[in-house]
Amino acid sequence: MGIFHEFKQFTIRGSAVDMGVGMVLGAAFSGFIDSLVTDLLLPPIGVLYSSMNFENMFISLDGLFYPSLAAAKEAGAATINYGLFLTAFIRFVIILFAVFLVVRQMNRWKKPHQHPLDGLTKKECPYCCLPIPPRAVICPHCSSSLEEQKISSRTRGTTWKIK
């Protein structure tokens, strides 16, 4: 499974622990990521787009032209600062991807024999109806044996209970 597919699964199915780790790492990486985006990533992109400065990309709502965002703010004009928003969005994606890589590696260290997606997917115990790992043979909540149910359901025919 590709790293970007795992990244998509991580962003869709984050848990409270993953989000807590994300908050801590986001705070720790804030200065680094800010410098990375502002000083290294955006200047070459600005050169590609005719020497644009992303911080001076804005729309003045009063209809007048201002040479920079600072001049517009000094004049008291209301502006939509889409350049600053774009910079913040790039920072956010980089921080989110860095947190994903850290949590992904932590999950591998915890259970090296387990595939990373097995931690994200759960099945339901037929006895206590709580989520359990997909490869579990004994429910960790109610201690019921799930293998016996599979064997007995094969010999008697499949019976499904829908609640």
Image: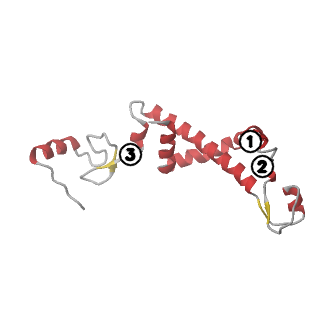
Q: Secondary structure at mark 1?
A: helix
What distance separates the C-alpha of mark 3 from that of mark 1? Answer: 39 Å
Label 2 vs label 3, nearer the camera: 2
Q: Residue at x 29, y 54 (%)?
A: 129
Label 3 vs label 1, nearer the camera: 1
Indicate the amino acid at tag 3. Answer: Thr
Q: Residue at x 58, y 46 (%)?
A: 22
* Residue named by callout 2: 54
Res 35 quadrant in image = top right
Res 43 quadrant in image = top right
What distance separates the C-alpha of mark 2 from that of mark 1? Answer: 9 Å
Category of crowding for the residue at label 3, using alpha-carbon neighbours closer than 10 angstroms: few (below 14), some (14–19), many (at least 20)? few
Q: Residue at x 42, y 40 (%)?
A: 117
Indicate the amino acid at tag 2. Answer: Phe
* Residue named by callout 3: 121
- Name the mark on residue 45: 1
Which sits earlier in the primary sequence, circle 3 or circle 1? 1
Res 58 quadrant in image = bottom right
From the top left corner, tell me how far across and down residue 108 is, in percent. Answer: 46, 33
On-image quarter of the C terminus: bottom left
From the top left corner, tell me how far across and down residue 146 is, in percent. Answer: 22, 44
